[in-house]
Image (cartoon, rainbow, N blue to C red):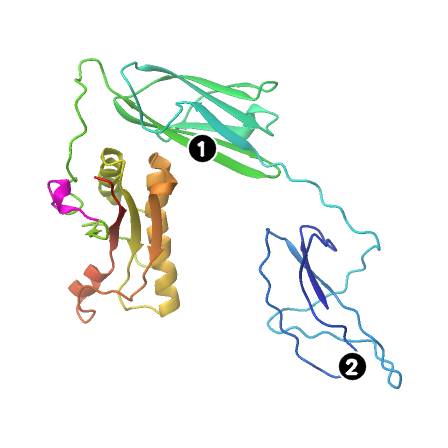
Amino acid sequence: MRIWGGNQVCSRKELLDESPLINHSEWREYSFRFEPSMKHTYFFLEVFYKTPSLFPYNGNILIDDLGNIFPIPCEEKEIVEEEKNPPIVNITNPVNNGLETREQGFRFTADVANISRKSQLTFFVNGTETEIGFNVAMGSVTANLELEPGPNRLKLSARNKDGQNQESRTVNYIPPSQPVTAKPDFTPRVLTGLKDRSELSEGKKIPLNKMFFMADSSRIEVDNFPILDELFRFMMLNEDISIEVGGHTNNRCQVEFCQMLSEARAKSVVEYLVDKGIPEYRLKYKGYGKSEPIATNNTATGRKRNQRVEVTILKMEG
């Protein structure tokens, strides 16, 4: 028996596992464990068996935990799958994240590939869809912007029949009347109440006070935006710091669900920061479920404290 993976019916794009030749007429169990090296839409089972000399046998397959299996005739020739060409997005200006400028007028530029029309592109400035120019022949995207004071979040998304891609940048506009000062060396009070970096160290856990989710939900509510914006500013002001966002729950759910929910909540926080312009390599997320309570689960107050989000300093150079 051979198990193939592919993106079409009868496709043999990747051989995932195989058994020895089946040369008996008994019911026997065959277990397979495979790790695909790519994404597959279909799994194709191909069975070869040797008919015993005394008992002609046509063969049957019984697979646990699956629905009915319907035989599908496949042509002898192997199906050649079309090459996938998902879009490619490369922002060229700003050249790096967190660029500072004293000019309010800003020209955004980017290069894209595998895009044939403007409708396949979407450009957002601070969460608002914004008009762009697109040269199909050159694959170039441009936009003339009027920046707002402070961080401006720019995100270009592209999609075609083979997939989608996006890239984000942040530009900090400092108005001429606002003096340029050195980056302050402090941790925003909303994180811990700490006032300077001397109280920070690698491995230190910082609870996001007043950060709460609705029951059984990982969606970030509007009330949490100011808290996460403070965390965003903390990451912008401390570019040498990398963090882990950890999600925790109380004990009022099954282990598997608690684990899934806590990880989803931590992931939603990281996605919020990435969307605002923090590089992904500085962020990790992990769900701890109900394994690390900081208070008793026997009271409503204790359970509320245990259902939390914490930031752990993974790396800092200063």
Q: Quadrant of residue 260?
A: bottom left
The residue that disc 1 covers is 167
Element at label 1: strand
Relative image position of residue 278 (x, y in whole percent): 33, 37
Residue reaching furthest to the bottom: 54
- Nearest the viewer among 191 and 181 is 181
- The three-letter amino acid code for the residue at tag 2 is His
The residue that disc 2 covers is 24
- Nearest the viewer among 301 and 13 is 13
The residue at the point 16 percent across, 17 percent down is: 179
Side of 115 relative to 55 (left or right) = left
Q: Main secondary structure of the magenta part?
A: loop
Q: Is residue 221 visible?
A: no
Relative image position of residue 317 (x, y in whole percent): 24, 40
Residue reaching furthest to the front: 317
Relative image position of residue 79 (x, y in whole percent): 77, 49
Q: Upstream in the sequence, badge 1 or badge 2?
A: 2
Q: Is residue 122 magenta?
A: no
Q: Is residue 274 visible?
A: yes
The residue at the point 19 percent across, 48 percent down is: 201
- The three-letter amino acid code for the residue at tag 1 is Glu
Which region of the structure is painted magenta? 193-201
Relative image position of residue 292 (x, y in whole percent): 25, 64
Label 1 to label 2, Cα distance in Å?
56 Å
- Nearest the viewer among 246 and 264 is 246
Q: Is residue 200 magenta?
A: yes
Q: Residues within 10 Å of mark 1 (few under 14, many from 20)?
A: some
- Nearest the viewer among 98 and 255 is 98
